[in-house]
Image (tube, helix red, strand yellow):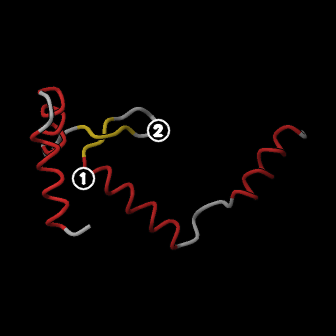
Amino acid sequence: MGISELKNKIHQQIENSDEKILIQIAKLLETNAIISYDLHGNALNLEQYNNLIDKGIEDIKNGNFISQEDLEKEIQSWYNV
């Protein structure tokens, strides 16, 4: 779907939305609007959220992660103490 089609689709959805949905859209478009929460329950705006995503992508590129298999082994070791 191209940008023009996407804009038209969003425009049509906005036109057919009720007040509750329009308020949510307006909040989402605000620069400091809370769009998510971190693992500790701290509110994140769009910029903070995107920064965390970028950091996660960098971690993966740099090999800073644990595989599913290794994680399962680690969890299993907790029960075999």
| Label 1 Cα crowd, 10 Å radius (few <14 / some 14-19 / many 20+) | few
Q: Which residue is mark 1?
A: 47
Amino acid type, callout 2: Leu
Identify the residue at horizontal 65%, vertical 60% (top origin): 66
What amino acid type is highlighted by mark number 1?
Glu
User: Mark 1 or 2 closer to N-term?
Assistant: 2
For image coordinates 53% across by 67% down, the residue present is 60
Disc 1 is placed on an element classified as helix
The outermost residue toward the right is 80
In this picture, residue 34 sits left or right of residue 25: right
Q: Is residue 80 above or below residue 23?
A: below
Instruction: Quadrant for the C terminus, please.
Output: top right
Q: Residues within 10 Å of mark 2 (few under 14, many from 20)?
A: few
Q: Residue at x 45, y 68 (%)?
A: 58
Q: Residue 22 placed where, x, y %?
A: 13, 34
Q: Quadrant of residue 3?
A: bottom left
The quarter holding residue 57 reads bottom left
At a point 25% along the width and 44% down the height, the residue shown is 45
| Looking at the image, residue 50 lies above or below residue 33 | below
- Apparent side of residue 64 relative to residue 10 in the rendered image (left or right): right
Residue 39 is tagged as 2
Q: How many marks?
A: 2
**Residue 6 vertical position relative to residue 19 in the rendered view, above or below:** below
